[in-house]
Image: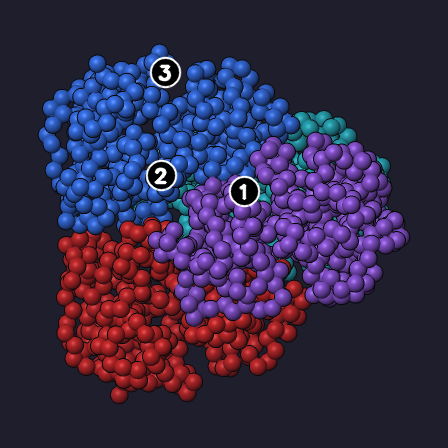
Chain colours: A red, B purple, C cyan, D blue
């Protein structure tokens, strides 16, 4: 089969790889119907994630069909259409027993496209299937559903839940990329009084508005002053960092009110300064976290009931074999305006070709 | 009357000052029976707290007798023996209504010995008395009780409650000064499995043992390795920073397990590095905070029931007029071994002279 | 002035009473701009609330203007337009310090129209004004705002917060009177998956739909079967009792899923059977409660931002002097279709006469 | 092998039964080292638990050695010494994912000695072994450890955690049988100010004192008056029902303060009256629940560290084959003073015969 293989920093290829087989009786093999590319994949390609071995197939998000199931798998079987979570969970360790799947100590965690071959391929092996894939309600479109492998639960769990958003709150989301946008969309589930989106790209702020931001401000346009004005100088109840650089994290710690919450979602490559000389007495709660995907069943149910917006997040659609072009479009987001790109496998692709937003050729 | 007046960085004097009178109908005037000196007072004298105006009487902890009460005061009256909290609270603003007295927006907060004259004097005016002083149960010794003006509630609220200590936890307390010791003593209220104390002074570690630390380790003696060994490499459930320098804060963020809590109590003068490149995915909760003293009624009840250790914390006892000598002993803690020094006013002093640990001359 | 005086069970009159004056320096006198009638007032008239002395002016909800303020009052002054909360709170006792104003032990609690003269009059004395009235944002209509004296915070605090409604939940509200309707409206702040309304009157179910219920079922039409069908036999996450009779409370305990929450809002006159032989192992949480009105500032802010529906709840509007007719209309709700009736005082009445829905004569 | 077989109400026998074998690849077979008898077993024999089929081996608590493990079992293997939990958990359903194992919807829940053969036998088959047995730390005595299969986690989870015990609380435990005693012992982990034990048997109150009750009162001796006196008329913060009859449940709802918690542990056979006419406005939280045993790892760690008292709970020790005599002693507790009886299997029995408290013959 074909897969997107990481060879060394800067070098990847869509090429022939061995089809995966069951290695453990808790595994399933999934034929990939739809996958997508994550900002983290770009970090891997740049060489920022040393755990990724040469030869690894990338990708950690997918919707697909179970084609083979190990003998221990009890919750899905061949023929089932499933969401492949970005987190694999043993289900037995102390962390998994508390739903902290991202911290699994039993061999799980972020495996796909990281420590083992991932979803940017025609087939993928998913370990610990009973805790790592989710049966999909029948009618869900795979382009919508694939956003629940990582993007939606991350915005919700690491942004909104860690930020403890409550009715009436002022919430600031710094960074209006896919994760920031899902933070905005899911923050609305708790009826904050207002959501302020901050980004340095005007087009992203437009998206923020479509996902529910009540106020939008360029990073260059004094966002701290705006928050100050909106809150009578008190600061925001919740600030959510969805960029991953020291400047935006530090901005979040300045914009939050005494007693407020800072939720960091960004993947950081270097330290930030924590200005304890100002913050030690501010009663702050700062949370960091990797997604657990424990909220996926609830979020899928909300999606199925039409209570969450998804489609506009997929700006570009490709056939699976156009993977390399999709990477170019995604990596060049400033020019292409890409938010998330979806890649559809051949069989399903033929079935609903008419709905394609952008074709590969 | 006499009071300890801050004139400029490095210059204070025990000298004549005007006796305080009621300025607001919610005030009380308290005759100081016992007061004490806080590490923050030393910071003020060093010039680190710019809000303190020249001429201010220092001190924010006291036990005493109400001698005059404004006409709005409803919960105490002249003749009552009270604990003067380090935090004054308007009781009406949004923060006070949630018990976040330290963040009072109605004119309260940390006022005594900071923005107004404090407790290191014969008399002190306490604003917003109904929310800022506590009636003392009859039999309590003033040396015990004075520790509940700041030291005990700070260790408990900012350390133990913000750290969310639970039964079975491994708790690390970095810094075994008075605040670290009360964190240890009050962490035990939640039955952690073990408490590890870290300090750079052997004598302080001895104290930590007396307050309930199960393991004690010098900062120079690889505390991180010890915590690693004790927790099978996982890290502590809770780390409590009770020093106030970047090194110890950063140590706390390294010693905590994924999913754990870091509670900062230390008063910091400069930024710490937050190593988000390691911590972004560790599901950490980091809390900062100023004490609210909302736990004082419960803690006093525990003290009264004999469930909290206090006396050993007062290592030196002086007459009030020996204030300057007391400051020297307290500032020279490395040599004198001082933890907390207590100063007793003249009238009460005569009554129980026999119990003095150390006299002034 | 005139007021609605309770003389004995079954006997009330709109008659001359003495104008209230300040009795305590924390009181305010409020000229009533708008008041309303509560189902509890009908219970009082029926003699079900023995604490109400003959001669008491009824009513515990109002919007009005402060005309006189005691010397201790700090947060409002004459000329301010305020919401008078149904709960008066001393602000100093242990319960008030935790925001549990309904349980005030310092002389507050439900006083107005119960233990002291209430709001169904031209003027009302409100004790503990700083914790018992709320400044109104300028533009709010008094008919909207008066619903936040009791009806909205009760539905929200005692129904939604005590029921711990979460995104994705199935919520059942039994009883679609004013309190049930505000439970429905405020449950939506937490984005439940669906809200099921149960009532025995078809017209009330229509209202439930307008306030946001997704499914509506007559009490006679097998509501338990419907909930069973909607939840695959599991039961609702949250059931909210807003009637006050044993049958509906017991229905709520049958319709809730294992691990779910039952929130009782209803004012009950006799015991219900708690079927512990079935429920002991169901992991239920059952909450009862009197409103605290601690959520009023947040709810008013949501109202001001246009995020809460109110106007349709006032079905009938009268001049204050038509109080007796208003009681008849309200008591005869089955025929008149009344939900809440509003009564407007003379001065304000003249100013906006054109907006009256129903006049008294 | 031999086992205690339930034939029909009133008729059981220690007789030959088929040795259990693996039925599912997630099962283990455990050789019973120590088992015990629960009050629920007596209810079964009286015919009160209709789900128990004739021919079922009773018992749901054991310590033993794994002698065979299904091919899916990953956390234990033959030769391991384990605690067999009274709850079996699939680990995959929504309830199990939240740690609510007692409510398992995937085929687990209370199975042993209820829906399948139990632990009062030489061998027992335990389904879903990875979530239903716990590896024992090496040095633990089996008589201590067997109390953690049901008795200790029930007192802790359903009593103390559901009751939300906090430092400084007044806690009342009604019923000083084994479950009441473990509620007392584990309530102390949260440092309540005082624990009041209520029972109708003086000898049980003596035990309550040994487990940490500060006050003890006979049910006939006005316990409500005592609680009233101890709390200045306010009532207890937490009341824990550990009997299972309407009278004691209703007593718990009368003795709790406004805003307090009632935790029901008792297994009830008929409804109780919930006096909503008094309670609707008291801000009560009433919890019911089946144990999950999710706290077992923490509790075992506390036991291993010497922080929990256990041994005195086992008042009588028998050889396994003396099961029928053990039942008589346990059922006649009023005369024999039995709290828990332990039964030891032959091999282990020989090893530590000298420590027997009571022998069978």
Q: Nearer the viewer, residue A71 or C5?
A: A71
Residue identified by numbered label 2:
D304
Instruction: Name the spot of residue D124 as percent of width and height, x first.
Output: 18, 34
Task: Classify A107 as above or below C261.
Answer: below
Tell me what residue is drawn at x 81 percent, y 48 percent.
Answer: B321
> Is residue D352 shown left or right of residue A328?
left
Tell me the chain of label 1. Answer: B
Q: What is the quadrant of the C terminus of chain A in the image?
A: bottom left
Instruction: Name the spot of residue C24 as percent of width and height, x first.
Output: 82, 40
Label 1 to label 3, Cα distance in Å? 40 Å
Q: Nearer the viewer, residue A279 or C176?
A: A279
Tell me what residue is drawn at x 14 percent, y 54 percent.
Answer: A71
Q: What is the quadrant of the N terminus of chain A in the image?
A: bottom left
- Residue C71 visible? The answer is yes
Tell me the chain of label 3. Answer: D
Residue identified by numbered label 3:
D337
- In the image, farthest residue toward the top: D335
Label 3 to label 2, Cα distance in Å? 27 Å
- Which of the two labelled residues, at mark 3 and mark 2, occupies the earlier sequence position? 2
Q: Secondary structure at mark 1?
A: helix
Q: Nearer the viewer, residue A346 or B42?
A: B42
1 vs 2, front mark: 1
């Amino acid at each position: 089969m074909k897969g997107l293989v990481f060879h060394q920093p800067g070098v990847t290829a869509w090429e022939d790889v061995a089809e995966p087989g069951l290695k453990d009786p808790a595994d399933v093999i999934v034929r990939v119907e739809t996958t997508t590319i994550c900002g983290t994949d770009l970090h891997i390609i740049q060489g920022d994630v040393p755990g990724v071995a040469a030869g690894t197939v990338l990708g950690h998000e997918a919707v697909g069909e179970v084609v083979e199931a190990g003998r221990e798998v009890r919750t899905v079987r061949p023929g089932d259409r499933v969401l492949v979570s970005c987190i694999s969970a043993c289900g037995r360790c102390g962390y998994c027993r508390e739903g902290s799947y991202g911290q699994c100590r039993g061999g799980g965690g972020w495996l796909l496209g990281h420590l083992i071959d991932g979803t940017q391929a025609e087939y993928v092996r998913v370990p610990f299937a009973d805790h790592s894939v989710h049966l999909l309600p029948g009618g869900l479109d795979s382009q919508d559903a694939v956003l629940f492998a990582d993007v939606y639960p991350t915005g919700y769990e690491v942004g909104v839940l860690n930020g403890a958003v409550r009715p009436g709150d002022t919430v600031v989301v710094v960074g209006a990329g896919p994760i920031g946008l899902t933070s905005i969309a899911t923050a609305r589930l708790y009826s904050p009084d207002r959501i302020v989106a901050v980004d340095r790209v005007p087009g992203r702020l437009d998206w923020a508005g479509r996902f529910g931001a009540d106020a939008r401000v360029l990073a260059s346009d004094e966002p701290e002053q705006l928050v100050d004005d909106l809150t009578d100088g008190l600061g925001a109840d919740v600030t959510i960092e969805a960029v991953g650089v020291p400047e935006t994290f530090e901005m979040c710690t300045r914009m939050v009110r005494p007693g407020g919450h800072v939720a960091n979602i960004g993947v950081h490559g270097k330290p930030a300064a924590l200005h304890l000389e100002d913050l030690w007495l501010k009663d702050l709660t700062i949370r960091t976290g990797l997604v657990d995907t424990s909220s996926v069943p609830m979020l899928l149910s909300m999606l199925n009931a039409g209570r969450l917006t998804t489609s506009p997040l997929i700006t570009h659609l490709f056939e699976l074999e156009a993977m390399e072009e999709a990477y170019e479009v995604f990596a060049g987001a400033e020019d292409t305006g890409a938010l998330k790109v979806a890649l559809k496998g051949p069989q399903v692709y033929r079935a609903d070709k008419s709905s394609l937003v952008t074709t590969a050729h």
